[in-house]
Image: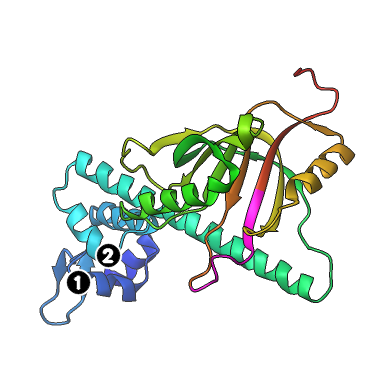
């Protein structure tokens, strides 16, 4: 057996932490000397300690790890990991939205100071993304109504709404209608309700991305600005997938009619590529 100091060196876990794990019953010493109180561990206990550290690294609390180590089946562990994965994915969406709000605030301050916007279009790749969406052919003025309905649908299933997503399938329908797909990006799957369906938005191998502030009460000029940038920089607009726009959640207490931070995504191909 190994003294706690030696076991600490082998495991690279501090003596203080090992004592705490003993205190909460997560990793008891194999033997404790009755006279000196010294703790002794066996080599076999390294395996349990490594499992504790692995689950801790995945974001589980020590209170959650204890039951996992005690005769939990592989199927149950897999279910727990899936739940943790969904939880982390949701946190990523929330943090991305927070970053977007910070960027929007920086741009707003610079604009108020009379400086040019700090955001410039970039070309990047967008992976396939999970979303709850509704596709409809409606007047353009119905976009806000559909967006609010999408957010209520997601909130009704116990999930904080992620970024709002709009896919523009066809803007040239009769009577001023547009063919749009409106929804909310998800960190984990939720139930379909017959109106909104959970789908995976297609990847966008090459897109021109433009972060901007969009006034929901006025005319947004982001598409014309990005189109000019595409033309100047040696690209042309691809036919597929459809153009996409993300609207990031407002900060708590912010005026719903205020400028919203948005990201316009237009699929592009380099001039001269054989895709026509």
Regarding mark 1 in the picture, which secondary structure is present there? loop
Q: Quadrant of residue 56?
A: bottom left
What's the magenta region? 253-263
Q: Is residue 19 above or below residue 126?
A: below
Mark 1, residue position? 24
Give percent across and percent down for residue 200.
Answer: 47, 34
Quarter of the image with the C terminus is top right
The structure residue drawn at horizontal position 43% and vertical position 55%, both measured from the top left corner, is 161
> Upstream in the sequence, badge 2 or badge 1?
1
Please identify the dominant SS of the magenta region. loop
Please give left or right for residue 121 compared with residue 77 in the image.
right
The structure residue drawn at horizontal position 15% and vertical position 72%, both measured from the top left corner, is 32
52 in magenta:
no
Is residue 250 at all visible to an observer of this figure? yes
Regarding mark 2 in the picture, which secondary structure is present there? helix
Please, which colouring scheme is shown? rainbow
Quick check: marks 2 and 1 in contact, CB under 8 Å? Answer: yes
Mark 2, residue position? 62
């Amino acid at each position: 057996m190994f003294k706690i100091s030696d076991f600490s060196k082998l495991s690279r876990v501090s003596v203080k932490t090992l004592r705490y794990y003993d205190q909460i019953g997560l990793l008891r010493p194999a033997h404790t000397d009755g006279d000196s109180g010294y703790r002794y561990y066996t080599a076999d206990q390294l395996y349990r300690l490594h499992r504790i550290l692995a689950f801790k690294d995945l974001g589980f609390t020590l209170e959650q790890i204890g039951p996992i180590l005690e005769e939990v089946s592989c199927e149950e562990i897999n279910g727990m990991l899936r739940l943790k994965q969904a939880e982390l994915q949701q946190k990523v969406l929330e943090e991305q939205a927070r970053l977007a709000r910070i960027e929007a605030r920086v741009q707003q301050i610079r604009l108020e100071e009379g400086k040019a916007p700090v955001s410039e279009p970039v070309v990047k790749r967008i992976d396939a993304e999970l979303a709850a969406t509704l596709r409809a052919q409606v007047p353009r003025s119905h976009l806000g109504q559909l967006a609010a309905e999408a957010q209520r649908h997601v909130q009704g299933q116990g999930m904080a709404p992620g970024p709002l997503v709009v896919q523009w399938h066809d803007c040239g329908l009769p009577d001023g209608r547009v063919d749009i797909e409106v929804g909310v990006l998800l960190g984990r799957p939720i139930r379909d309700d017959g109106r909104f369906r959970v789908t995976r938005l297609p990847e966008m191998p090459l897109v021109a991305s433009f972060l901007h502030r969009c006034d929901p009460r006025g005319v947004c000029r982001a598409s014309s600005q990005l189109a000019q940038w595409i033309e100047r920089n040696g690209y042309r607009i691809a036919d597929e997938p459809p153009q996409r726009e993300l609207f990031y959640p407002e900060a708590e207490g912010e005026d719903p009619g205020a400028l919203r931070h948005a990201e316009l995504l237009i699929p592009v191909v380099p001039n001269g590529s054989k895709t026509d």
